[in-house]
């Protein structure tokens, strides 16, 4: 380039600006253009790198936040036990016996809004790890010192299912229910003290102060409600399709900013002696109106301030309203209503006839079924079935005690307050007797339809008992025993009467399900118990992860806005780079074009060698 310039200066004396222009253009290219291009390229690559890193981090964070939803809550069988798996044991000490359940869960997902992914342990065949012993723990009221010997087989069984490496970190809960509640408090304490003293000497499980206790019926109902909704994934916050509901949170203006989350389901559990109902209350007005004994407020989150998992649940239990106790009360009512007739028969001339002549007609038994039953005083009463299902339903209404004064409207059974239920936006699950009554004989367990169920019940009740016995002997009803066949008519009428006349469910309600299993799981309140009692454990995992790995709740929602700002900044930088480039070009102005008279001839552009070749210039030499 230097040589060209010299040639230019030497040959083209008429255009002295040549070298100046060439030099200026070179300066522009090396100075303005190169620097501008380098700066722009650097900024562009930096912005692209920032966006890429942010998206990659966000993807990893989303994967971590969604870990709990990706870990299936289906069949919870694990063939190998990883070092990070945790275990828990819950022993249900009921009136008829005690059962042990073993649960496990992987590390917490890292999202403070997620609960632990607790699942029931299963054996290699896929069966739940459960063991039962009889009789109940309450039978040791006169010998509390033998309680630990009684419970030892259950602990040995659970120990054999848990790797030794994890046993020192395994939580143990022994929770007693109905039978133990009937004992004096001093006797209860003596039994629990024996367990608290002896078990730590033989087993390495984690035992805290309140791990062994007698729980109330209210607690048991709440645990059952938690278990059902947990299995149905109603406590999650993913994108799965779940009905939503607006919840009014105490201390917040919910009308201006309603809190939206997944709608939970209600439960109705009818056993042999009692019945429980529980469902969430979402209105603050209703919460304020409910008597405190009928309301349970609890938080399932690892922080007490977590409004995502704050629940207020209406829960009540009706003693004597279980199916078996209802039958006892019904028989007492029949005996009382026919006592005058029986008395007249006994004092008449026919008093020496067979007792069959004083049989009590029973519309709730199949036709011609003769049933002998002993009352509280030891007197045996004989009932003969007439199979009139509609009459049976009407005769059961007085047992609901609907005439008891209702001190706070609305009320259900026994004058007990029952908060308003939105039957257009709710769902209920019925357990125990609801399932057995619908499934064991009628085989229509699941979604309940009043008309279908009533038709099945009427058809069954009008059959003669001899015909039903014939069906039973042919094993046409493998799920039912003979007592179920005898009581099916009565229990069908009792179930529908309680549901529609007592609890005020509309006959056209389409969201009531009778269930025994949910997602192939046998629903037990023990699952709800361990979920509630381990709710603070995620705090330990969150502390390990460190605050740098935990983003605030607005983080994911702000990424879209953040990326939009990056794009705007990128466009601004490009425009500014172009503007600066154009401005720098003006620092080296271009000279005006000269006139045609000053334009050089063709020879002007020829080199020295070209001119010699054309004879324009003669070569001179220093040598002759």
Image (spheres, rainbow, N blue to C red):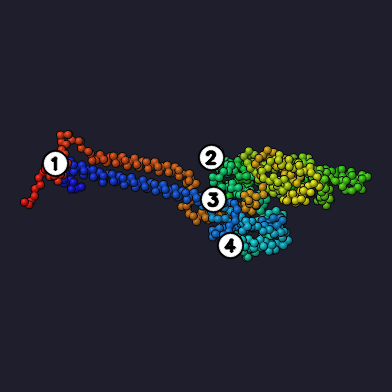
Q: Quick one: label 4 or label 2, which is nearer the N terminus?
A: 4
SS class, disc 2: loop
Residue 19 falls in which quadrant of the image? top left
Question: Which numbered tag is attached to residue 70?
Answer: 3
Q: Residue at x 62, y 53 (%)?
A: 527
Residue 532 x %, y %: 60, 52
Q: Residue at x 18, y 46 (%)?
A: 4
Residue 449 x %, y %: 68, 41
Can residue 384 be seen from the camera position used here? yes
Viewer-nearest of discs 1 and 4: 1
SS class, disc 3: helix
Residue 509 x %, y %: 67, 39
Q: Which residue carries the number 4 mark?
A: 163
Q: Residue at x 53, y 38 (%)?
A: 256
Q: Quick one: label 2 or label 1, which is nearer the N terminus?
A: 1
SS class, disc 4: loop
Alpha-carbon span between mark 1 and mark 3: 83 Å
Residue closer to the observer: 444 or 371 = 444
Q: Is residue 34 left or right of residue 366?
A: left
Q: Are marks 3 and 2 in contact (CB under 8 Å)?
A: no
Q: Which residue carries the number 2 mark?
A: 257
Q: Quick one: label 3 or label 4, which is nearer the N terminus?
A: 3
Q: Residue at x 85, y 44 (%)?
A: 339
Q: Quick one: label 1 or label 3, which is nearer the N terminus?
A: 1
Q: Are marks 4 and 2 in contact (CB under 8 Å)?
A: no
Alpha-carbon span between mark 4 and mark 2: 49 Å
Q: With respect to residue 368, does 182 lie above or below?
A: below
Q: With respect to residue 611, does 302 lie above or below?
A: below
Q: Which residue carries the number 1 mark?
A: 13
């Amino acid at each position: 380039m230097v040589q060209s310039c010299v040639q230019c200066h030497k040959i083209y004396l008429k255009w002295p600006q040549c070298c100046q222009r060439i030099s200026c253009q070179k300066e522009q290219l090396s100075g303005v253009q190169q620097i501008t291009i380098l700066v722009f390229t650097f900024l562009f690559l930096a912005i692209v790198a920032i966006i890429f890193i942010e998206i990659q981090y966000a993807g990893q964070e989303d994967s971590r936040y969604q870990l709990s939803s990706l870990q299936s809550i289906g069949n919870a069988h694990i063939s190998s036990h990883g070092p990070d798996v945790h275990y828990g044991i819950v022993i249900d000490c009921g009136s008829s016996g005690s059962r042990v359940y073993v649960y496990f869960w992987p590390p917490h997902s890292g999202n403070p809004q997620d609960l632990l992914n607790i699942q029931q342990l299963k054996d290699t065949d896929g069966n739940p790890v459960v063991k039962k012993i009889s009789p109940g723990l309450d039978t040791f009221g006169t010998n509390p010192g033998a309680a630990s010997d009684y419970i030892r087989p259950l602990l040995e069984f659970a120990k054999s299912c848990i790797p030794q490496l994890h046993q020192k970190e395994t939580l143990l809960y022994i929770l007693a229910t109905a039978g133990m509640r009937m004992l004096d408090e001093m006797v209860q304490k003596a039994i629990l003290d024996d367990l608290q003293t002896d078990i730590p000497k033989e087993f390495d499980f984690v035992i805290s102060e309140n791990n062994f206790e007698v729980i109330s019926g209210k607690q048991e109902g709440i645990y059952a409600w938690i278990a059902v909704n947990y299995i149905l994934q109603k406590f999650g916050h993913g994108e799965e399709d779940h009905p939503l509901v607006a919840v009014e949170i105490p201390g917040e203006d919910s009308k201006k900013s309603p809190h939206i989350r997944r709608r939970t389901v209600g439960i109705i559990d009818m056993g042999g002696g009692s019945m429980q109902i529980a469902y969430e209350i979402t209105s603050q007005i209703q919460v304020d109106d409910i008597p405190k004994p009928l309301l349970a407020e609890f938080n399932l989150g690892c922080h007490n301030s977590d409004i995502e998992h704050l629940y207020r649940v209406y829960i009540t239990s009706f003693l004597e309203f279980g199916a078996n106790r209802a039958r006892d009360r019904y028989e007492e009512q029949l005996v009382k209503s026919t006592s005058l007739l029986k008395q007249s028969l006994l004092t008449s001339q026919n008093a020496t006839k067979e007792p069959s002549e004083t049989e009590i007609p029973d519309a709730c038994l199949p036709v011609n079924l003769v049933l002998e039953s002993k009352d509280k005083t030891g007197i045996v009463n004989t009932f003969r079935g007439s199979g009139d299902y509609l009459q049976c339903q009407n005769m059961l209404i007085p047992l609901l005690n609907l005439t008891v004064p209702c001190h706070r409207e609305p009320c259900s059974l026994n004058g007990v307050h029952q908060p308003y239920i939105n039957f257009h936006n709710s769902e209920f699950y019925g357990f125990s007797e609801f399932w057995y009554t619908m499934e064991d004989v009628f085989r229509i367990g699941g979604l309940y339809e009043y008309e279908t169920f009533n038709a099945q019940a009427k058809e069954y009740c009008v059959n003669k008992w001899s015909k039903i016995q014939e069906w039973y002997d042919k094993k046409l009803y493998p799920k039912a025993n003979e007592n179920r066949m005898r009581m099916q008519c009565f229990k069908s009428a009792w179930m529908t009467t309680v549901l529609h006349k007592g609890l005020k469910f509309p006959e056209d309600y389409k969201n009531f399900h009778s269930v025994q299993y949910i997602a192939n799981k046998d629903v037990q309140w023990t699952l709800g118990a361990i979920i509630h009692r381990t709710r603070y454990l995620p705090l330990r995992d969150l502390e390990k992860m460190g605050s740098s790995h935990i983003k605030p709740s607005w983080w994911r929602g702000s990424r879209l806005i953040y990326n939009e700002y990056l794009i705007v900044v990128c466009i601004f930088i490009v425009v500014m780079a172009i503007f600066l480039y154009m401005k720098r070009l003006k620092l080296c102005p271009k000279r005006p074009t000269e006139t045609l008279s000053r334009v050089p001839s063709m020879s002007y552009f020829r080199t020295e060698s070209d001119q010699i070749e054309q004879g324009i210039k003669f070569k001179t030499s220093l040598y002759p």
